[in-house]
Every structure is written in C-alpha cells, then in structure tokens.
Image (cartoon, rainbow, N blue to C red):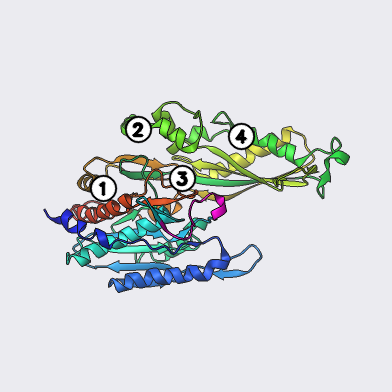
Amino acid sequence: PGFTTAVLQYDRRIRLNSMLIDSSNVLKRPDLHRMMEMAAQKLRLMGGTVELVDIGEQELPDGQTLALPKVVTAQFGNDPNKHTVCVYGHVDVQPAKLEDGWATDPYNLTDINGNLYGRGASDNKAPVLAWIHAVEAYQALNMELPVNVKFVIEGMEETGSNGLDAMILAQRDTFFSDVDYIIISDCGWLSRRPALTYGTRGNCYFYAEVEGPKQDLHSGVYGGTVIEPMTDLVGILGECIFSGKILIPGIREAVAPLSDEEWRMYQDIQFDIDNYKNKIGVNELMYSNKVDLLAHMWRYPTVSIHGIEGAFSDPGTKTVIPAKVTAKFSIRQVPNMDPAMVKKQVTDYLHSVFAKRKSPNKLKVTMVIGAKPWLADTQHPLYDAGKAAVKRVFDMDPDLIREGGTIPIARTFQDVTGKSIIMMPIGGFDDGLHSQNEKMSRYNYIEGTKLFVAYLNEVSQIKHTSV
C-alpha cells in the first residue's frame, strides 16, 4: 500500500532527452561519443558505479578505421542477498530527414497532444530513460532498491552493434558473473494492451550478384544480342517465393511445428486485422484470420527482396543494360532453423536454378548477416513477475507476443551468459519505429516507468532457487 501513490508523486520529474544521434553517419561520430559520455555522467550523478568500456574500432568501406562509441556499464547495489538484473538498451537512432515526410523536425523532440515526436523517441530513448528513472524513483523516495540493477547501454545498435558481442564475451566472468536476469525493452506492444515479448525472429541477409558484360550497354544497340544480367537475376529471384510460399528446399521443413499451446496463446492475443490493414495501407493481407497472420508474422520464416544494386532507379528514363546487378534479400530465421544450413540451402538452390538458365553470366551468392532467433520460456518466473507488474500498473493481463524482427543481442546474451531473459516493451503499437513521425506517448512513457518500478519489486520476490 502506498507504493503506487509514491511513484505517482515522481511522475512530474520524468523528462525525455532530445539528443538524437544517427550511428550510421560517420561524420556524426564525435556527437555519438559525446552522447555516451552524457549517459555515463547521468548514471554517475545517480551514484552508480560506471565504466565506459572501449570496444575497439570500426573499419570503413574505404579501409579507414574509426573509434567505436564506448559501451556504458553501470551498477546500483551489490547486495549478495538480492537478485541482480541487467537492463540493456541503446541510445543511437535510425537516420531521418524532414523531407522524408516528417511533420516535425525529427531531431528536435516535439510534444504534440500528449505525444513526444522525434527519431528514437520510442526506439530506444524513452525505454532507456524510463529504466533510469525507475532507479531514480526509488532513490528520490528514499526506498531501497529491491534488487541490484546493472545497465549496459550501447551506441551502435542500429548499425549492427559493432563490438558488443566481443565485449559481452570478454566480461562474461566479470560484469555479468553475478547477473541473474537480463531485461530488454527494445520492442513494442501489439495493441493498446501491454505486452511481454518472449521471442524474436533471426535474419539471414544475402547478396546475389550476376555479372555479365565488362560495362553497361545501350539497350538499343546491344539489346537482343546479349544475355542480360538483370533478366537472369529477376528470374532466379522469382524462383525463391511464390504467394508467400518459400520455394527453397529445406527451409519450411526445418521450422518447429506450431504447438496446441501456441495456438491457444495466439487466440487470446488482442489484435485487430482491420486496424492493421489500415495502419499499413493495404486492402488485403496474406492471411485472413488472426492466428495465421500472427504465426506468419512471428514464428514462420519469410523471404523479402529489398532491392537491386546496379539497376537504374533514378527518375526518368535510361535505356541501359546494367553489366552487373546485385539483389539484396533476407530470410527471417525461426526455431529450428540454423543460419549455416540456410546459407548452404540458399546458395545451392540459387546456383541450381541459375544453371538451368544456361547463362554465360556469373553468379555469386554471399550471406552477410546470419542472426539466430531467440525464444524464451513463458513459464519462467520472470514472466510471472512481468504479468504481476502489468496487472498492478495497468489493471489487466498482458499479451504474450513475439517479434517478427530481429534483436540479435538477445540471442548473444542467451548464448554467452546463459542468463534468463525477458523483453518488456513500453512502446505503443503505433509509435512508428524506423518510420516517419516516430513518437512515444506520454502515457506509455510515464506508465511504462511505473511498470519498470513495479517489475523490480516483483523480481525481488522470485525465489532464489529459480534459474
């Protein structure tokens, strides 16, 4: 009694930092370094034991090297009789430009009708700050933290978390040795109902390059005399997927079957198909019922073709036959798929399809990303604590959901540290992550901070025999 009232008294102190740095822009790297220093200083002023961990350098395409932003680690409390949780987050953001269709300056946090608009507002600034404010709330109210809290905050997540895997491995037996549980809040709700996330898809990203003539050719002069690389490339891509069905042998056969328990979980999830269609602006989806749609969004693989490098894509007309074109496509990984096997399956299949064309052109297939999926046990006490915290703050049960996207750090934490992980989002379903007009509502931000405060309390009550 009085706990929620005490947290309510702290609401007015919650603010969102508007410093937003795109980690993909190497010209902004000094600002990124400064931002990591700011995050470290914030945690120091709160009394945390803070380190800025050097994770080395990044090699640029032109061969130059650039220092990676240091990873911030912090610790609050070291009571051996308490559980220790580690909160992961990132403070870099996706690129954004006003001319892309933003209604406000994407790099100037703007408050409109209870929504905080700005690139990174939801992904992942607000969740990181909400966790920091959760610790500050206990401090400001002179309440002892119920668990020891550690932070790992990075600045390169949006460009692949360069250097972070090696840092986690290097500190497995030091910083992470006494960690019991890891919490990630780099995700969002599915609807207006709060959610707990227990799985993500992985990602195998491929380049398929077809090379022909030694230079681009005029289609009027050479069209009809050469076998065009673009025609070959489009032809083999068309053999990868048809009407949502993956045609590459072995992919669908490797997928873990949908269990009766999963089917029942999907039935209970709050999800409005019509709202979903309206949100993305389509009249028809691949599947017409909720369970099939959610299953294919979260726990079945998909092939997506992202673009063709070397093709003419500017406005206007250009009668060119490209000499070399490279397709970029990905396959989202799910249990029980293995990226190494998928690499072989895709490479062998594309070469076999290409061989049937009897083309003199050359095909090269490369897998540049091989991120594994992550899946947690929803029966773990971490999820019981999450349900209790959601019930306390929002007075409702959460949806148990999976993410269709990839958060590689979850699988890294799982494989390297062996710790139990939960994803606890506070972002809204309509926040527009990576899109124009990204936002975080004040409601989600403030209630999300309360959720984190309540969750720390619930985790403290997990019996120490649980692992």
Q: Which residue is mark 4?
A: 240
Tell me which residue sits at (54%, 34%) in the image. 250
Of circles 3 and 4, which is in front? 3
Give neighbour class at mark 2: few <14, some 14-19, many 20+ (Cα, 10 Å): some
| Residue 395 among those drawn in magenta | no
Q: Which residue is mark 1?
A: 386
Q: Which residue is mark 2?
A: 266
Residue closest to the eye, 68 or 120 = 120
Query: Mark 3 belongs to which amino acid?
Result: Gly
Residue 9 appears in which quarter of the rendering? bottom left
Magenta stretch? 97-110
Disc 1 or 2, which lies upstream in sequence?
2
Query: Mark 2 belongs to which amino acid?
Result: Tyr
Q: Tell me, for residue 405, which label it has, or none.
A: 3
Gap in angstroms between the C-alphas marked 3 and 2: 18 Å
Residue 141 horizontal/vertical position (percent): 18, 65
